[in-house]
Image (cartoon, grey):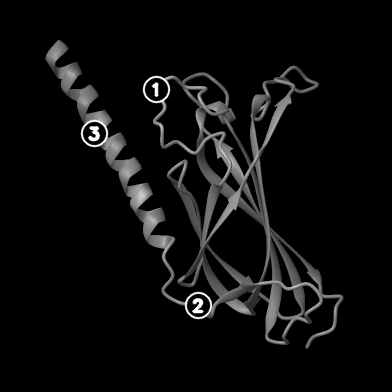
């Protein structure tokens, strides 16, 4: 029985490591551009071309500080400046980096419930404004440091301004609640839109 349990442990470990490797390889692959004509960043004061819509992409995650875990590899990006976010839209890729800001927030909310982002850690905020053509698009969003990603499709309409928020879902360990110290499990996305107020080019 002991031998069986040992074999089971190693099999689980191998599958877990294989899963991490697959996630890392996929993110690395998606960080390479196959095209360069899908999107471009908004330039202040430049009118939006008629065939394009503006999309503001935001994401905010919290990680543990550098050195929090004794066995963490030296190459870890947690708690360090230059934390990367990978975006790939229809084959065009970009890696955006955030330097982060140290924060220490209450561990529990007003109802006494553990806050997923409570405690001391590093906050990374991403905000980018891009121009995309109206229509359907395949979006890939990944965090190389966490080896997690999300793929989804969006349909954008002309004369609309969009706000795409990517929210982290933190890992829950055993009976413990979801918490940023456990890492990011996946993402949820929320898309909002407003009618465009500025004139077309």
Residue, disc 3 = 14
Image coordinates of residue 83 in percent, x first then y, are: 55, 45
Residue at left offset 14%, top offset 18%: 4
Q: What quarter of the picture does the C terminus occupy?
A: bottom right
User: Which residue does the image show at 37% across and 48% down from the upper left?
Assistant: 24
| Residue 17 vs residue 175, the one in the foreground | 17
Q: Earlier in the sequence, mark 2 or mark 1?
A: 2
Judging from the image, what secondary structure is the residue with disc 3 in?
helix
**Mark sitting on residue 34:** none
Report, in whole angstroms, how far the alpha carbon at label 3 lies from the one at label 1: 19 Å
**Quick check: 192 left or right of 187?**
right
**Tag 1 or tag 3, which sits nearer the N-term?**
3
Q: Callout 3: 10 Å neighbours few (<14), some, many (20+)?
A: few
The residue that mark 2 highlights is: 36
Spatial CA distance of label 3 from label 2 is 38 Å
Q: Residue 176: x, y in percent? A: 54, 20
Which residue appears at 39% of the width and 22% of the height?
A: 71
Q: Which residue is mark 1?
A: 71
Residue displayed at 78% across by 20% down: 111
Residue 148 lies left or right of residue 56; in this view the side is left
Q: Are marks 2 and 1 in contact (CB under 8 Å)?
A: no
Q: Position of residue 104 (x, y in %)?
A: 71, 25
Q: Secondary structure at mark 1?
A: loop
In the picture, the quarter occupied by the N terminus is top left
Per the image, label 2 sits on a secondary structure element best described as loop
Q: Earlier in the sequence, mark 3 or mark 2?
A: 3
Labels 3 & 2 near each other (Cβ < 8 A): no
């Amino acid at each position: 029985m002991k031998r069986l349990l040992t074999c089971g442990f190693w099999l689980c470990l191998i599958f877990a490591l294989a899963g991490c490797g697959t996630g890392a390889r996929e993110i690395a692959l998606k960080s390479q551009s196959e095209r360069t004509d899908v999107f471009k960043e908004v330039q202040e004061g430049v009118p939006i071309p008629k065939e394009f819509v503006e999309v503001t992409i935001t994401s905010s995650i919290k990680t543990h500080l550098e050195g929090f875990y004794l066995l963490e590899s030296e190459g870890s990006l947690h708690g360090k400046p230059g934390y990367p976010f990978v975006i790939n839209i229809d084959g065009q890729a970009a890696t955006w980096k955030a330097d982060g800001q140290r924060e220490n927030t209450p561990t529990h909310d007003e109802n006494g419930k553990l806050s997923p982002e409570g405690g001391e850690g590093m906050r990374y905020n991403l905000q980018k404004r891009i121009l995309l053509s109206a229509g359907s698009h395949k979006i890939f969003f990944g965090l190389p440091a966490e080896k997690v990603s999300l793929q989804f499709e969006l349909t954008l309409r002309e004369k609309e301004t969009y706000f795409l928020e990517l929210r982290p879902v933190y890992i829950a360990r055993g009976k413990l609640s979801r918490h940023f110290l456990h890492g990011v499990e996946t993402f949820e996305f929320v898309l909002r839109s407003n009618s465009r107020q500025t004139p077309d080019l």
